[in-house]
Image (cartoon, rainbow, N blue to C red):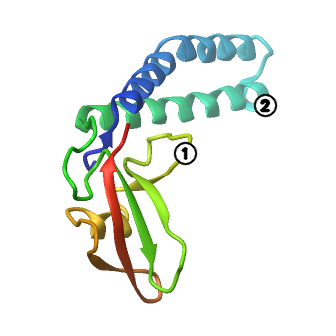
Amino acid sequence: MEQAHLSPQAHQRLQDELEERSGARRKEISAWLERAREHGDIRENADYDAAKNEQGHNEARVRQLQSMLKNAVVVEGSAGDVVAPGTIVEVRMDGDDETTSYLVGSIEERHDTYEVLSTGSPLGQALLGHGPGEVVSYEGPRRTFAVEVISVRPAG
């Protein structure tokens, strides 16, 4: 799994989710399974099937969180003037008059004001390391796009 660049807040939120899912949520699902078994034959028990399905989803998310947190890089906010995890980048897409601002980070980030631009996305990869005034290009599904970096500032 690639490194996830997370803000301290996102890292803590994911730690909390992992704790909840591997503790209290596991116990809830286990109790649900026990109640469902009491209803009789599990081969024709929709409640049991639903509980097993939920257990599978929960355990998959636990594994995903463990892997992500193991490989996570916690970034405070870049002090530089180039696009990096933990920065807010304002860009203008080729042909647009309006600009768009993004928080550069992991898809697991949440922000009230800005959309998150993953460092693993084609646009995110193209912008990394570039500063204001630079025009970069990246491959889209059907064509190459050009994007101008208008400004870069630390998130926070």
Sequence-wise first label, 1 or 2: 2
Report, in whole angstroms, how far the alpha carbon at label 1 lies from the one at label 2. Answer: 42 Å
Q: Is residue 24 above or below residue 50?
A: above
Of tags 1 and 2, the one toward the viewer is: 1
Mark drawn on residue 84: none
Q: Which residue is mark 2?
A: 46
From the viewer's side, name the closer residue of 142 and 24: 142
Q: Is residue 121 above or below residue 23?
A: below
Q: Quadrant of the C terminus?
A: top left
Mark drawn on residue 113: 1
Number of numbered markers: 2
Does the rendering let one see residue 79?
Answer: yes
Q: Mark 1: which amino acid?
A: Thr
At mark 1, the secondary structure is: loop
From the viewer's side, name the closer residue of 73 and 67: 73
Residue at the spot 32% in from the left edge and 50% down from the top edge: 153
Residue at the spot 38% in from the left edge and 77% down from the top edge: 147
Q: Residue furthest bottom?
A: 143
At mark 2, the secondary structure is: helix
